[in-house]
Image (cartoon, grey):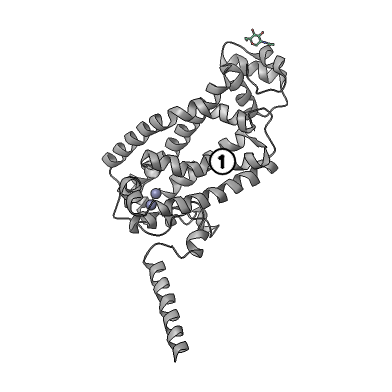
Amino acid sequence: MSTVFANVSLVSLVHADTFSATLKNVSLYQPQLTLIEKYWASWYIYMSNDILATGLMFFLLHEFVYFSRSLPWFIIDQIPYFRRWKLQPTKIPTIKEQWYCFKSVLLSHFLVEAIPIWTFHPLCETLGIKVTAPFPSWKKMVPEIALFFVLEDVWHYWAHRLFHYGVFYKYIHKQHHRYAAPFGLSAEYAHPAETLSLGFGTVGMPIFYVLYTGDLHLFTLCLWITLRLFQAVDSHSGYDFPWSLNKFLPFWAGAEHHDLHHHYFIGNYASSFRWWDYCLDTEAGPEAKSKREEKMKLRAQRDVKKMN
Ligand SMILES: *[C@@H]1O[C@H](CO)[C@@H](O)[C@H](O)[C@H]1NC(C)=O
Ligand SMILES: [Zn+2]
Ligand SMILES: [Zn+2]
């Protein structure tokens, strides 16, 4: 029996043999719910197994969002008109390259995610992550998601920076750097150990949050993961448009930031925001390098003056 409604007898009342019949019943008995809440509740009631309902939902959400967000970038790569906004315009990924990447990402999704599918709902129950309909208000969800973006970025900066040291790079992170000019699909092309440790920023930060506050809804987590996938795929797209988000939010990293990381292999370790690389002087690219050298020269001159 699902726990999607606080009222358990309501769940057994509206349960039907097909999803659409369940949806019809839910709409009839819970007309105050929004459309998406009705679909959510019907999914849990129709499945009659919260563990499978949560696990399967996350798997399908991940696959759907990741590949459907990558598809427009694949199409854009085929259209010469868009080359003017490509960050490394001479390096257009071939269809063969993208096909290889697609296959290996899909395979690793099936291998890596088989476990979370079966363990995620029990984990949610232990932590007190709710699945109930109705959902929390936007006023509650938006600041939570913003916080997850900030926290994930902290984790990503330090873990990614660590991945660029010796053995970590050689045996794990090197795989992700196969593409010096990345494309959308290559966002999750990585060693499983990297997927797990960098993925911890996405799933682990909300877990810390709920351990601290005791209050988080699974739908908030779904929205967060969707937006985080958008961020990851877009930052690997290889395109920087005049209408890209970083043109409106100057601290947003975007493709311009992460493309330089793939091009030069050092610097720009953060995922969503520019502040860590800026403040800790790890920005990538020749421009940042000459700025750094300029700063070092000034410092040296100052020291010489002091000595005189
Ligand atoms: C739910 O739908 C099924 C199939 O349409 C129907 O048989 C059942 O009576 C409905 N339940 C309620 C409470 O309306
Ligand atoms: Zn890297
Ligand atoms: Zn990357």
**Relative to 16, does residue 228 appear above or below in the rendering?**
below
Rendering quarter of residue 63: top left
Q: Which amino acid does label 1 sit on?
A: Trp
**Relative to 162, does residue 26 appear above or below in the rendering?**
above
The residue depicted at 51 percent of the width and 64 percent of the height is: 279
The residue depicted at 56 percent of the width and 51 percent of the height is: 150
Decide if residue 209 is in sight here.
yes
Rendered-image quadrant of the N terminus: top right
| Mark 1 surroundings within 10 Å by alpha-carbon count, few (fewer than 14), some (14 through 19), many (20 or more) | many
Query: How far from the left and from the top, in percent, is residue 115?
Result: 45, 28
**Relative to 179, does residue 193 appear above or below in the rendering?**
above
The residue depicted at 56 percent of the width and 35 percent of the height is: 222
The residue depicted at 56 percent of the width and 49 percent of the height is: 151
Query: How far from the left and from the top, in percent, is residue 54?
Result: 55, 26
Rendered-image quadrant of the C terminus: bottom left
Residue that badge 1 annotates: 224
Query: How far from the left and from the top, in percent, is residue 112?
Result: 41, 32
Secondary structure, mark 1, is helix
Query: How far from the left and from the top, in percent, is residue 138?
Result: 67, 41
